Image (cartoon, helix red, strand yellow):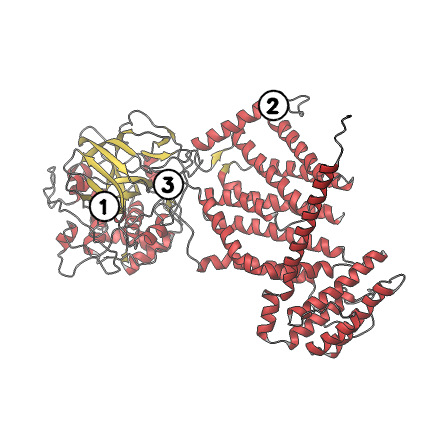
């Protein structure tokens, strides 16, 4: 197998390995086998056309044509000529499939079902990326730029899927790219002859043997690849997180993002909420007016997190549909529970771009303009195709449900389906969570009493402290640590209570949104950054999803949890107004002089900040990651350009022997230029007027080279004189090793600062400017000559 055919196989393998990052997006994952087969055919066509050989553009055109025919055969054979030649009907059918696939993406959450449209999108996308990688790495012999389409493919998949297996997909993609780079390096080395052979029959000029410490370039490439992969894996652990999350200050929402078509992403707001707690400016997120006087219990809910997989609480994978005119009755709510219908007009700030629509819960009708979709289980609205809340004005009709303690205490068991879905906890949940839940709720007669005891344990009797500076951690380990340290913020309290409730058999989930905000003089309510909050919702048959408030001195404690005596009367406990502090604080929130009863009623002074929410935008997460990656490459790459250019020039000059007289001369002069440029990099500027022999004596004298390097310089000078003056120049073996011997001697005798200067800022890199200037002059001369020729050309008309 030829080196280029082998490189093509590596390019296809790198594409397929990167494509594995798409596996979590679609179920079932059988499409990967079809994509692999079609990719193999595409690669084979490229190998055959390059073997003919065809011109490079024709090779790419042949591969593109065969790719189109393959897609036609698989997806539009009934509309094509002979089942494989695409015509107008086939193109129309493929266009319809792509449109259907885009609609399916908007209709389904991850993982989406493998419809024909989605299958065309993923398989076609893999083939397009495969063609780009093959073109760059094999046809045009530039494997390094081939990483850009691979990065685009991986970034889209990683930005949409996330999850605990993201590291595995990264390793596969990175391994494929490094494998491609090493394959290209090996293929290039195979064309250099046996210059690097340390033994055997390789010819070399008389003189000292090369230093035994020279490392083969392939081995060096492997080490560089391993180091690069290690840096990519471990350096991000020490850098600020790029995760936006639900309420992240980086500006990432949970929804679909631009063009996402309503796909609901699963995110972990645990870290992002903590990062948003300590912002200095409490900007206004939205204002609203409502026709109820009980604004303290009017939480503006964004989304519910009802899937706990051991790593994060996140929204379950749900279908989303068109927004109905009126929403159905909330699940579990019976006619015996008192309720009131309220209307709330909300105006979002023009900078606040959240994919999910904040609404009082449970909403029964929403009047809003724009492209929105409805998720029936969570009763939430999510933006479609880039729609977000920036500057939105809308009206929400919702229910103010007012159950009594007796109704909650006498609630029957939930349905088996409800218990199965909402009491599920991962096997990784530490046993201390369930053990603590049983201990705290010992002696309870029903689930309601257990829920109230859990709430009081966190908010009153458990000596928990509200602290925004606590590291959030992740998953079940964070919950166990929180129960041990008894210090955290609203995410810790809500996640812990919901998890403990599930271990007791109480259906539970976590809601994220805003508390009621601050009353204004004109009668409106203002919701600021620090009003963002997370709280648990527990399900009681006959009442439905019911809010609890375990976080000390945050929000308002529901009246149905404040009864002091059993009965069916509603609690008369006061609902004190709650205000947030103006600045975040790391101090515990509970005052030592505050009684447990006042703490339960949220009447204690608040000594800590509320949860803050950063501004959201409508970009996909992967675009932000790509922007940061490119910016980092630019910042790091520009200062390294002289070093990279110098490395590339050295590799070309010392790359291989020549066979013809012209090639021998070019190779010998290149090796000599490498020696003079190396001396220049270490401070010995070249003098073009000197003969090679005089230049060699000058380099040896000023460079203080050792004996072996001195002999190498003189051998190179003699070889240059031969190609300049001999009638028929003969190749001289070992010139590349001699040039490297001179460079090693310079590095050994130079100071550390001089070596660093020669590496990062080589003086000979000024040749780039000279070459650019010469090229500009040549181009100008050619354009001038062509213009003059056009002006002098006879018109061809007869007088």
Determine which residue is flagged by label 1.
451
Q: Position of residue 158 (x, y in %)?
A: 49, 45
Relative to residue 230, is residue 586 drawn left or right? left
Q: Nearer the viewer, residue 152 or 330?
A: 152
From the viewer's side, name the closer residue of 384 and 540: 384
Alpha carbons under labels 1 and 3: distance apart: 22 Å
Q: Indicate which disc, 1 or 3, sits on the residue closer to the N terminus.
A: 3
Distance from the alpha carbon under mark 1 to that under mark 2: 61 Å
For disc 2, the marked residue is 90
Q: Is residue 204 visible?
A: no
Question: Outermost residue, right direction?
Answer: 727
Image vertical order of residue 745 relative to residue 298, above or below: below
Density class for disc 3 (Cα within 10 Å; few <14, some 14-19, many ≥20) is many
Disc 3: which residue: 315
Q: Earlier in the sequence, mark 2 or mark 3?
A: 2
Query: Disc 2 on helix, strand or loop?
Result: helix
Q: Quadrant of residue 120?
A: top right
Image position of 391 with respect to 485: above or below = above
Query: How would you rate the neighbour count of disc 1 (Cα within 10 Å): few for under 14, some for 14-19, many for 20 or more?
Result: many
Give the CA separation, mark 2 to mark 3: 39 Å
Residue shown at 34%/28% (left/top)? Answer: 323
* Residue 592 location (% of width, % of height): 16, 61
Residue 84, image x, y percentages: 67, 25
Picture quadrant of residue 702? bottom right
Are the two marked residues, 1 and 2, in contact with CB atoms closer than 8 angstroms?
no
First in sequence: mark 1 or mark 2?
A: 2
> Which quadrant of the view contains residue 537?
top left
């Amino acid at each position: 197998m030829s080196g280029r055919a082998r490189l093509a196989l590596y390019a296809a393998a790198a594409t397929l390995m990167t494509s594995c990052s798409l596996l979590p997006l679609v179920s079932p994952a059988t499409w990967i086998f079809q994509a692999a087969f079609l990719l193999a055919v595409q690669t084979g066509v490229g190998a055959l056309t390059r073997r003919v050989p065809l011109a490079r553009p024709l090779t790419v055109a042949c591969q593109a044509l065969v790719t189109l025919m393959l897609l036609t055969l698989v997806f539009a054979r009934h509309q094509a000529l002979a089942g494989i030649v695409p015509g107008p009907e086939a193109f129309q059918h493929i266009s319809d499939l792509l449109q259907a696939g885009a609609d399916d993406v908007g209709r389904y959450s991850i993982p989406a079902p493998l419809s024909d449209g989605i299958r065309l999108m993923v398989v076609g996308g893999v083939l397009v990326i495969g063609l780009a990688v093959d073109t760059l790495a094999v046809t045009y012999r530039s494997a390094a730029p081939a990483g850009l389409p691979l990065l685009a493919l991986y970034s889209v998949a990683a930005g949409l899927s996330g999850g605990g297996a993201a590291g595995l997909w990264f390793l596969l993609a990175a391994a494929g790219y490094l494998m491609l780079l090493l394959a290209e390096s090996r293929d290039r080395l195979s064309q250099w002859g046996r210059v690097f052979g340390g033994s055997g029959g390789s010819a070399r000029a008389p003189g000292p043997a090369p230093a035994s410490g020279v490392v083969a370039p392939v081995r060096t490439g492997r080490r560089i690849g391993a180091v690069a992969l290690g840096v990519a894996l471990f350096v991000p652990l020490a850098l600020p997180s790029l995760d936006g999350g639900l309420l992240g200050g980086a500006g990432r929402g949970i929804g679909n993002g631009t063009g996402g078509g309503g796909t609901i992403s699963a995110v972990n707001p645990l870290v992002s909420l903590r990062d948003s707690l300590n912002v200095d400016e409490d900007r206004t997120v939205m204002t609203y007016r409502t026709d109820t006087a009980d604004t303290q219990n009017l939480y503006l809910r964004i989304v519910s997190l009802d899937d706990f997989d051991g790593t994060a609480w996140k929204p379950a994978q749900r279908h989303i549909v068109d927004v109905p005119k009126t929403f159905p009755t909330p699940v579990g709510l019976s006619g015996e529970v008192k309720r009131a219908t309220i209307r709330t007009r909300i105006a979002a700030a023009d900078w606040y771009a959240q994919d999910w629509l904040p609404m009082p819960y449970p909403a029964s009708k929403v009047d809003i303009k724009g492209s929105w979709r409805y998720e029936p289980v969570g009763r939430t609205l999510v933006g479609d195709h880039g729609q977000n809340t920036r500057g939105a004005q809308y009206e929400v009709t919702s229910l103010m449900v007012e159950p009594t303690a007796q109704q909650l205490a006498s609630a029957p068991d939930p349905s088996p389906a409800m218990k199965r879905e909402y009491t599920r906890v991962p096997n990784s949940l530490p046993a201390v969570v369930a053990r603590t839940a049983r201990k705290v709720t010992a002696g309870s007669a029903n689930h309601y009493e257990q829920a109230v005891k859990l709430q009081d344990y966190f908010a009153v009797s458990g000596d928990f402290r509200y602290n925004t500076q606590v590291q959030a951690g992740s998953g079940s380990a964070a919950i166990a640590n929180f129960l041990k340290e008894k210090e955290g913020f609203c995410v810790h309290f809500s996640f812990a209570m919901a998890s403990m409730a599930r271990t007791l058999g109480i259906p539970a989930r976590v809601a994220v949104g805003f508390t009621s905000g601050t009353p204004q003089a004109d009668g409106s309510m203002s919701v600021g950054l620090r009003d963002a909050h997370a709280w648990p919702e527990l399900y009681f048959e006959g009442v439905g999803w019911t809010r609890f408030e375990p976080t000390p001195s945050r929000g308002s404690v529901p009246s149905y949890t404040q009864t002091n005596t059993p009965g069916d009367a509603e609690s008369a406990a006061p609902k004190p107004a709650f205000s947030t502090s103006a600045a975040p604080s790391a101090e515990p929130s509970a005052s030592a002089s505050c009684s447990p009863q006042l703490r339960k009623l949220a009447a204690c002074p608040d000594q800590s900040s509320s949860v803050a929410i950063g501004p959201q935008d409508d970009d996909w997460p992967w675009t932000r990651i790509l922007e940061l990656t490119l910016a980092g490459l630019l910042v790091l790459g520009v200062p390294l350009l002289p070093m990279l250019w110098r490395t590339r020039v050295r590799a070309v000059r010392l790359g291989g022997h020549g066979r013809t007289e012209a090639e021998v001369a070019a190779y010998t002069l290149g090796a000599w230029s490498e020696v003079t440029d190396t001396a220049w990099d270490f401070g010995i500027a070249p003098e073009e007027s000197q003969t090679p022999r005089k230049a060699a004596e000058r380099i040896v004298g000023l460079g203080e080279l050792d004996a072996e390097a001195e002999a190498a310089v003189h051998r190179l000078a003699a070889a240059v004189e031969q190609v300049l003056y001999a009638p028929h120049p003969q190749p001289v073996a070992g010139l590349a090793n001699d040039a490297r011997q001179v460079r090693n001697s310079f590095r050994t005798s130079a100071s550390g600062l001089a070596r660093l200067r020669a590496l990062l800022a080589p003086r000979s890199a000024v040749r780039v400017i000279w070459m650019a200037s010469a090229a500009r002059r040549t181009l100008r001369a050619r354009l001038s000559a062509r213009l003059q020729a056009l002006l002098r050309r006879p018109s061809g008309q007869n007088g």
